[in-house]
Image (spheres, rainbow, N blue to C red):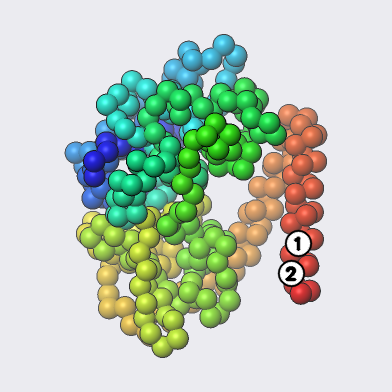
Amino acid sequence: MKHKVALIQPYFGALPNYFELALQSYGFNSDFDWHIFTDDRSHHEYPSNVFVTHTTLPRLRERFQQHFAFPLALERPYKLCDYKPLYGHLFSEYLQGYDFWGHFDPDIIFGRISRFVPDELYENYDKIFDKGHFALYRNTPEVNLLYRARVPHCVNYKVVLSSRRNWAFDERVDGVNAFFPARNLKIYTPSPIANIYYGDYALRLVGESKSRGSKAASSCFAYERGGIYRHFLEGDQIQREEFMYIHLQKRRMEVLCRDAPSYLIYGNAFRETEPITKRFLGTANRGRILYRHFWRKRKFATNLRTTWRMLVMERDYRQFSVRLMRKIRSMLGLRRESRS
């Protein structure tokens, strides 16, 4: 790879129990430098291309505050999602000499990134990917300060950073992604990723069918010496497809494998490798009948807390109305699909 890239991840609280496996995937991507800022001082075997700075969220907030004349709202780690597009500016002293920088989440096992991000993308685009859990930005003042742009019908960074609410500034359609075309900057959006939906026991991709005949119904993922693959049944044949990474959002995973260069990922666990046969794929995702019911209850509780915060704590009636109308439109759309 011709271009030098730095990846940044501030994370506060206990790192995921499978963080050693994530670190292993960082090490395989030796052409990237990984910078982690955390208050978790647990011992880990860090690869030579991973650099750790121990700090706290209040200290980081003080550091960020030096760049702004208005008070920042950064009291919860999850609020850092809104700050991701600003990392090129806020961590500029760590990014000297890099052509690109990016942000990433800790609940990801990476495959071979460079296989999916060839030099042509770095040369032709100013931002690569539009997801909050992983994206790359050209390391130039124009791109690093783009978050300050005033674009019609898009959210303003001052409103976002001064609010305790999470705006998803890093990936919403009227957030920072909309600023790039408005300033004649190019963004590459195709995402060759396994973004896993948290509400099903089977490792189903977000937006993928949940029918019995879908790929997810008879499948498993595998980490194979630096690559992420999904094995699945298609008719009577076993097929395999490669992804840049697997994003295990909100999913609790057990680690049932040794620290090895290869392992399987299915059944909410990282498991020892074994022969992948048609019989194996047909039974890998059975069980956990109440799993989806559990996540529905949890989502209901989350929505209830969000409603309480908007109406009682923040009194943000406008945003509550927007969320309510979006939900109504979504429900009406689903009903139309079911009738057609």
Give the spatial CA distance, label 1 vs label 2: 6 Å
Can the viewer see residue 173 in this picture?
Answer: yes
Q: Which mark is residue 333?
A: 1
x and y, in percent, of residue 17 in the image: 37, 49
Compared to residue 188, the image places residue 3 above or below, namely above
Q: Residue at x 42, y 80 (%)?
A: 233
Q: Residue at x 75, y 37 (%)?
A: 319
Q: Is mark 1 on a helix, strand or loop?
A: helix
Q: What element carries label 2?
A: helix
Q: Quadrant of residue 182?
A: top right
- The residue that disc 2 covers is 337
- Callout 1 touching callout 2 (CB < 8 Å): yes
x and y, in percent, of residue 135 in the image: 43, 42
Q: Which amino acid does label 2 sit on?
A: Glu
312 to the left or right of 34: right
Label 1 crowd (10 A; few <14 / some 14-19 / many >=20): few
Residue nearest the observer in this picture, 211 or 280: 211
Label 2 crowd (10 A; few <14 / some 14-19 / many >=20): few
273 to the left or right of 16: left
Q: Which amino acid does label 1 sit on?
A: Gly
Compared to residue 227, the image places residue 277 above or below, namely below
Q: In which quarter of the image is the N terminus?
A: top left
Q: Residue at x 76, y 31 (%)?
A: 316
x and y, in percent, of residue 181 in the image: 55, 38
Residue nearest the observer in this picture, 91 or 282: 91
